[in-house]
Amino acid sequence: MQNITIDGNVGKEGQVKQVRDQSVFSFSVAVKQGWGDNTKTNWYRVNVWGKRAETLSQMVGKGSKVVVVGELTIGDWEGKPQYDIRANEVVLMSGGQRPAQPQQSSQPSYDDEDTSIPF
C-alpha cells in the first residue's frame, strides 16, 4: 500500500454513488507543482466511502481547498497516468461554491488547465 498526502483545490462538483449498499463520494483535486513558467498541474481522483461520503458531499464543492490523506493507486488511461486516492482523511481548508460557505476569491481556478481529464 502506498500512502499519499495532497493539498489542492477541488476541480468540479463531486458525485455520490451507491456501491454495494455503501455511499461513495468521488471528486477531483488539482495540485500545482513547480513555479513560474515551470508550473504543472496534477489531477487526482479522490474516493471517500461510507458515512463520511454523505457528510463530505454536503461540504466539499468546486474550488474548495482540501488536504487529502489516503491510499494511492496509479493506473493508466489513454496513455496518461491516472492517480486515484482512497481517502482515509479529508480536511476542508476553505469553502467552495456551496451556498452556506463563503467564496474565497483568492483561490486559483483550475477549470481551464487541462480539458482532457478522464474524470
Image (spheres, rainbow, N blue to C red):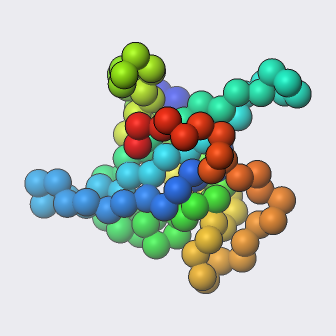
Q: Quick check: 19 left or right of 88? A: left
Quarter of the image for residue 71 reads top left
**Is residue 102 placed above or below 80 in the rendered structure?**
below
Q: Quick check: 31 left or right of 50? A: right
Does residue 5 appear in this view?
A: no
Q: Position of residue 87 (x, y in %)?
A: 42, 44
In the foreground, 119 or 7:
119
At x 77%, y 27%, the residue is 39
At x 20%, y 60%, the residue is 18
**Is residue 18 placed above or below 110 in the rendered structure?**
below
Report the residue that reaches farthest toward the top: 79
**Is residue 74 placed above or below 41 in the rendered structure?**
above
Does residue 82 appear in this view?
A: yes
Q: Position of residue 63 (x, y in %)?
A: 64, 59
Q: Position of residue 32 (x, y in %)?
A: 70, 34
At x 48%, y 37%, the residue is 117
Quarter of the image for residue 57 reads bottom left
Quadrant holding the C terminus: top left
**Is residue 6 placed above or below 26 in the rendered structure?**
above
Report the residue that reaches farthest toward the right: 36
Report the residue that reaches farthest toward the bottom: 100
Quarter of the image for residue 115 reads top right
In the foreground, 50 or 39:
39
At x 52%, y 70%, the residue is 59
Q: Where is residue 48 in the image (x, y as percent from the top left)?
A: 37, 51
